[in-house]
């Protein structure tokens, strides 16, 4: 049964509405949850909807949470004193134990206004092991009013002991036509589809099934859109270079890399999407993909096995992580391409 009335701000994600929403409504919900999904997949929206649901004081016959009471309003506007965020410091690659100690100091003071106090831990995959162990103490014996949401792109990065304390809810990812349909329900995106249909279609295809990511892409101007289109083509070229030796083309690619960190990160995330598509084409050819590798045009799809695709994905992911944590762009990218070549034929070696 669909629940349009439960978590009305959340699109799709029937499982989260059905299980988490109903459990909160009936007072059976636990006190810790892991929300897993790529950036822009709605983890925040889901956590905030649940936070409001836990303490909503309005009329919830038709909408849960009501969206109108003071609790709902303050949470939506980001001014609730009972919603606490743990965020990574921009200058740090990880979230250390100090952040969790600060949380634990707050934990034992009762809620200010609401029935529950909500602790949202962003990028939980970046918690250091000692931070996770410190958090574990709170997850094991929390005060009755505390509820934890661990937001993560990768729950496997969490310690088993943490994972065993909280059910994992994976955010739904959408197909490109679904993304387009949901976006067009908002007039500003419907207008964009009419005024710039190519860029609109491109963003819907390139967002990796994450609505928030599609919105983020479409917030760019059309000229940014053209640059993005070029980056997508670079990503296809770069991915094919991961699987064959062409020093001249490699050198050319390295020299033509964008200078801005943000653009390189976009290039790397597009490469990950393209690699994922290659794997999908291998294993589930009936599923939709977002990147087309034209047959015969240096296409790696035919001759490359899943193990090598996975190994390449790991390397691209690691390069992304390092560059995001301020590593040098040129040395990291050089390392990415050279080492991938060295491990050619050693499928599965990281
Ligand atoms: Zn409410």
Image (spheres, helix red, strand yellow):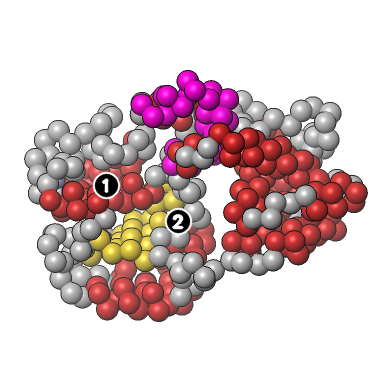
Across and down, in percent, residue 326 comes to 61, 67
Please tell me which residue is depicted at 46% across the width and 27% down the height of the picture. 192
Tell me, yes or no, whether the highlighted magenta stretch contains residue 192.
Answer: yes
Across and down, in percent, residue 143 comes to 20, 70
Q: Nearer the viewer, residue 292 or 223?
A: 223
In the rendered image, the residue lying farthest to the top is 194
Does residue 308 appear to the left or right of 52 in the view shown? right
Across and down, in percent, residue 296 comes to 84, 28
Please tell me which residue is depicted at 79% across the width and 27% down the height of the picture. 295
Please tell me which residue is depicted at 28% across the width and 64% down the height of the picture. 84
Q: Nearer the viewer, residue 285 or 318?
A: 318
In this figure, which residue is indicated by the disc labeled 2?
Answer: 152
Identify the secondary structure beneath mark 1.
Answer: helix
**Residue range highlighted in magenta:** 187-213
Identify the secondary structure beneath mark 2.
Answer: strand
Tell me, yes or no, whether the highlighted magenta stretch contains residue 16.
Answer: no
Q: Nearer the viewer, residue 302 or 244?
A: 244
Please tell me which residue is depicted at 25% across the width and 49% down the height of the picture. 76
Across and down, in percent, residue 309 comes to 72, 46
In this figure, which residue is indicated by the disc labeled 1?
Answer: 49
Q: CA distance from mark 2 to mark 1?
A: 17 Å
Whether residue 272 is visible to the viewer of this picture, yes or no, is no
Label 1 neighbourhood size at 10 Å, few (<14), some (14-19), many (20+)?
Answer: many
């Amino acid at each position: 049964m669909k629940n349009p009335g439960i978590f009305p701000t959340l699109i799709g994600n029937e499982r989260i509405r059905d299980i988490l929403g109903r459990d909160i409504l009936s007072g059976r919900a636990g006190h810790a949850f892991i929300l897993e999904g790529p950036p822009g997949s709605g983890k925040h929206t889901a956590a905030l909807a649940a936070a409001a649901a836990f303490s909503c004081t309005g009329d919830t016959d038709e909408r849960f949470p009501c969206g109108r009471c003071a609790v709902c309003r303050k949470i939506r506007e980001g001014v609730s004193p009972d919603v606490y965020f743990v965020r990574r410091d921009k200058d740090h690659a990880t979230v250390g134990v100090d952040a969790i100690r600060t949380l634990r100091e707050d934990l034992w003071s009762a809620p200010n206004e609401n029935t529950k106090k909500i602790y949202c831990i962003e990028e939980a995959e970046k918690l250091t092991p000692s931070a996770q162990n410190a958090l574990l103490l709170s997850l094991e014996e929390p005060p009755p009013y505390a509820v934890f949401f661990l937001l993560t792109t990768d729950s496997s990065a969490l310690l088993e002991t943490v994972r065993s304390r909280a059910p994992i809810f994976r955010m739904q990812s959408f197909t490109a036509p679904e993304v387009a349909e949901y976006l067009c329900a908002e007039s500003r995106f419907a207008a964009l589809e009419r005024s710039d249909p190519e860029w609109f279609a491109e963003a819907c295809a390139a967002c990796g099934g994450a609505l928030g990511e599609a919105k983020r892409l479409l917030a760019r101007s059309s000229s940014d859109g053209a640059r993005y289109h070029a980056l997508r083509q670079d990503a296809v070229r770069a991915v094919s270079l991961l699987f064959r030796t062409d020093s001249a083309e490699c050198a050319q690619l390295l020299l033509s890399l964008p200078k801005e960190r943000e653009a390189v990160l976009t290039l790397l995330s597009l490469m990950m999407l393209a690699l994922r598509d290659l794997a999908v084409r291998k294993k589930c050819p009936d599923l939709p993909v977002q990147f087309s590798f034209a047959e015969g045009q240096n296409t790696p799809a035919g001759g490359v096995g899943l193990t090598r695709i996975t190994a390449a994905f790991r390397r691209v992911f690691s390069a992304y992580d390092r560059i995001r944590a301020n590593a040098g762009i040129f040395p990291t990218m050089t390392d990415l391409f050279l080492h991938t070549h060295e491990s050619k034929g050693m499928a599965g070696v990281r």
